[in-house]
Amino acid sequence: MDYAQIDATLKASLREDASFLHGFWHGLNAGNDSWDLKAWLDALVAEFAISSMPAQLLKAFQDIHVTSSEQLAEDPLSISLLLPSDDDSLSLRAYALQQWCQGYLYGLGLGNRITNWKTLPNEFREWIEDITHISQLDETAIQDTNEEESDFFDLSEYVRLAVGHIAEHLTPTTKPTLH
């Protein structure tokens, strides 16, 4: 998936970041008992009050769903986060990671799979707590240095693996459908 292209399409119609909506997809997927393209589109219409869906917007939503479903079906630990390219500024990439985490937490919270957060294994609660902290990242304080670039890489890898582990344990044994 091309972050810049999907982000431009989404912002033209919704004013939402591609990273937020990609995180939202992963959160909803992990948090719900059944998940397919119709459920994804229904969630988007309901949560973002979408009254019309131009073909370009529908294609962006389908791309997010299909690519994310395929990655999860292959190996939840090999998912990719939809973030700007490494050529973009570190502050933009940090903002996108923050948005991704916010979307993930929002989608996970809307799901029906977790009825009592306190009953989750400790590692799940720690991952979710860490993702919550990352969702509050102040991208304006980030400097484009090698050290902060390395820190960003570590944070994004941590989020990717934590979300992969959560998906591995929470998602249904039947894989998401690609319709």
Image: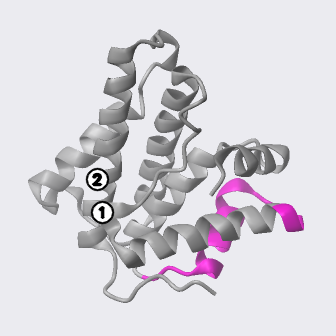
Q: Label 1: state its secondary structure.
A: helix
Find out whether the residues at labels 1 and 2 contact each other: C-beta distance under 8 Å. Answer: yes
Residues shaded magenta? 34-56
Q: Predominant secondary structure in magenta?
A: helix
Of 178 and 115, the residue lying toward us: 178
Image height of 64 relative to 160, above or below: below
Q: Which mark is residue 136?
A: none
**40 falls in the magenta region:** yes
Image height of 76 relative to 9, above or below: below
Image height of 124 relative to 99, above or below: below
Quarter that holds the C terminus: bottom right
- Could you tell me which residue is drawn at 45 percent across and 55 percent down? 80
Crowd class of label 1 (few under 14; some 14 to 19; many from 20; radius 10 Å): some
Separation of disc 1 and disc 2 at Cα? Answer: 6 Å
Give the x, y percent position of residue 147.
Answer: 32, 16
Crowd class of label 2 (few under 14; some 14 to 19; many from 20; radius 10 Å): some
**Could you say which quadrant of the image residue 114 lies in?**
bottom left
Q: Label 2: state its secondary structure.
A: helix
1 relative position to 151: left or right: right
Give the x, y percent position of residue 166.
Answer: 27, 62
Amino acid bearing label 1: Leu
- Could you tell me which residue is drawn at 51 percent across and 23 percent down? 90
Residue corresponding to mark 1: 77
Residue corresponding to mark 2: 161
Amino acid bearing label 2: Leu
- Could you tell me which residue is drawn at 28 percent across and 43 percent down? 158
**Could you say which quadrant of the image residue 167 lies in?**
bottom left
Give the x, y percent position of residue 126.
Answer: 18, 45
63 relative position to 67: left or right: right
**143 falls in the magenta region:** no
- Could you tell me which residue is drawn at 29 percent across and 67 percent down? 115
Q: Is residue 110 visible?
A: no
